[in-house]
Image: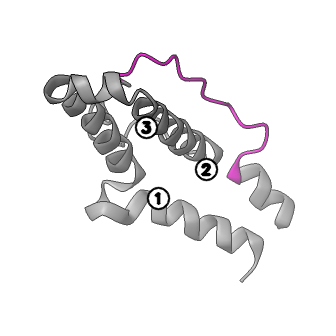
Amino acid sequence: MSKKNELLEIRKFCVDSNELCGIWKVIDEQRELLECLQTHSAETLQRCPWIEGWLARTDMFLVNLIRLLDLPDTAPGMGRFPRPWPGSYALKYQTPARSVSSVTTAFG
């Protein structure tokens, strides 16, 4: 399989997985998990503050992957989904220098 086709398969998987809610559902579920911990288990987050760090790094990875693949930050036709990041960390999302469209063009 060519690099172009591999990237297109990854993009398709990120869009079509999770009953067509795609990667946005995974991001939303991670954020919902943090909200649940904040609401129902705040003492756990206080004793184990690295848990929020884990979720923050996962969020940054997934959002950066969306951007690398030239996908919108919110799921098409689903309003404000995924929900906003609920954590205390100020997340730094990257805007990739090369998106899939430029990479696939380079691979012809």
In this rendering, the label closer to the viewer, 3 or 1:
3
Please give left or right for residue 96 compared with residue 90 in the image: right
Please give left or right for residue 23 compared with residue 46 in the image: right
Q: Earlier in the sequence, mark 2 or mark 3?
A: 3
Q: Which residues are magenta?
A: 86-100
Contact between labelled residues 2 and 1, with CB atoms less than 8 Å apart: yes
Real-space CA distance between mark 3 and mark 1, rounded to the nearest whole angstrom? 19 Å
Q: Is residue 1 above or below residue 79?
A: below
Look at 34% across and 41% down and name the residue there. 30
Real-space CA distance between mark 1 and mark 2, rounded to the nearest whole angstrom? 9 Å
For mark 2, what is the residue? 69
For mark 1, what is the residue? 14
For mark 3, what is the residue? 55
Q: Is residue 86 above or below residue 13?
A: above
Which of 65/47 is in front?
47
What is the crowding at mark 1: few (fewer than 14 residues within 10 Å), some, or many (at least 20)?
many
Residue 58 position in % (x across, y down): 49, 42
